[in-house]
Image (cartoon, rainbow, N blue to C red):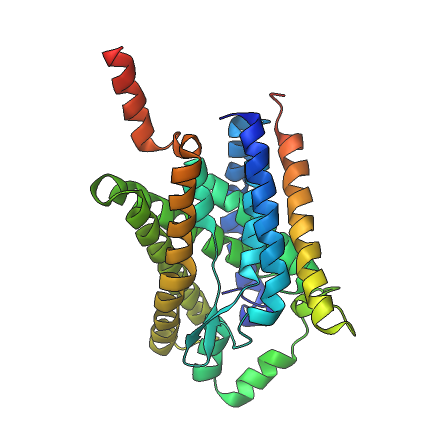
Amino acid sequence: MSGKSNMKFLYAGIAIALLVSALAPFLASSDPDGLESAAGGIIEESKMSELEEMEPAVNSPMADYSIEGMGKGGEVAAIAIGTFAVLVISFVFGKVFNKKA
Amino acid sequence: MHIPDSFIPLGQAVVYWVITIPFIFMSMKWAKNELDEMKIPILAALAAGVFAIQAMNIPIGMGTSGHMVGATLVAIVFASPWAGVLVLTLVLLVQGFAFGDGGITTMGANILNMGVVSGFVGYYTYVALRKSVGTSIAAFGGAWLGLFISAIVCALQMWFAGTFPLVPGLIAMGTYHLIIGFIGEGLITAVVITSIAKSRPDLLEDSFNAGSDRYNTEVRA
């Protein structure tokens, strides 16, 4: 594999990821996912509300892929920030672990 | 399928971390041995793509939605399930800490289900099917089965946790993820792998088949 075409792959990947980031807040279904849906269907209501009231172990800055008070724009930004964060972390990880360079 | 903190008691969540840490360690060892300057951009592109596509929930009917996981896709591209474990670990770390998607205590279970189980089942199903049915269908079948089996494992964990009853949990998780696996995992994986096979066949060359092809070419030469 050549380095040049791998960079092309990277740019294509970033373009697709950002396109998905921008579209997801408008196109993604807000229905509960498979696990939540299963939980809603088979757990007794009293227990379910108990589970829902429990605080997560860590409070996330952009819970539910949104930024407080920023609406849909905030959701686009949140997913784009996450995409870039994963991109940067993967690169840094790759550089650190790649001792052959 | 991101399990929140409240769904697994802390004691059990720790057990899943203990089971998962050796797999994370092995995936880092894979990175150390296999990643080079050429492959890092591919890994980064796939990780970013997996993160973004996981935000795109697809409606599957029954008031339910689901999204791609992506471990099988990454494993096929790198011809190693460890690559899938690595990418899902990175993605779940960011999702858990920055976005509250999946718990922190339950991250071990989530990496185990979505990275290890779906990646290993998906990749080796792909390898087993590839010679008889071709790359595209094998990628579809592997990704589909990988997601389905990881949902079954998740349902069992929910049962151990006392969160779901056994049979209804298996039926609900199994039904939803058969559909999510077909659309969200199988179809997308097949489309991406097929387009990579067409545009960058060299990327998939490291896979099993290529080994014997290369051998044949060398022998003939």
User: On the picture, is A20 further left or further right than B82?
Assistant: right
Q: Nearer the viewer, residue B68 or A18?
A: A18
Q: Position of residue B64 (x, y in %)?
A: 46, 76
x%, y% of residue B136? 32, 47
Residue in the foreground of this view, choosing between B40 and B97: B40
Query: Is A50 above or below relative to B220?
Result: below
Q: Residue at x 54, y 84 (%)?
A: A47
Image quarter of residue B155: bottom left
Q: Which residue appears at 47% of the width and 55% of the height?
A: B114
Tally of numbered tags:
0
**Quarter the C terminus of chain A occupies:** top right
Residue B184 x %, y %: 43, 61
Q: Nearer the viewer, residue B154 or B179?
A: B179
Q: Position of residue B5 (x, y in %)?
A: 60, 67
Give the quadrant of residue B216.
top left
Q: Residue at x 49, y 65 (%)?
A: B1
Left or right: A35 as drawn, with respect to B169:
right
Q: Is residue B39 visible to the viewer in this orientation of the structure?
A: no
Residue B195 seen anywhere in this rendered image of the structure? yes
- Vertically, is A44 above or below B128? below
A71 relative to A5 in the view: left or right: right
Q: Residue furthest top?
A: B221
**Residue A56, located in which quarter of the rendered image?**
bottom right
Name the outermost residue toward the left.
Answer: B132
- Quick one: which residue is furthest to the right in this view? A69
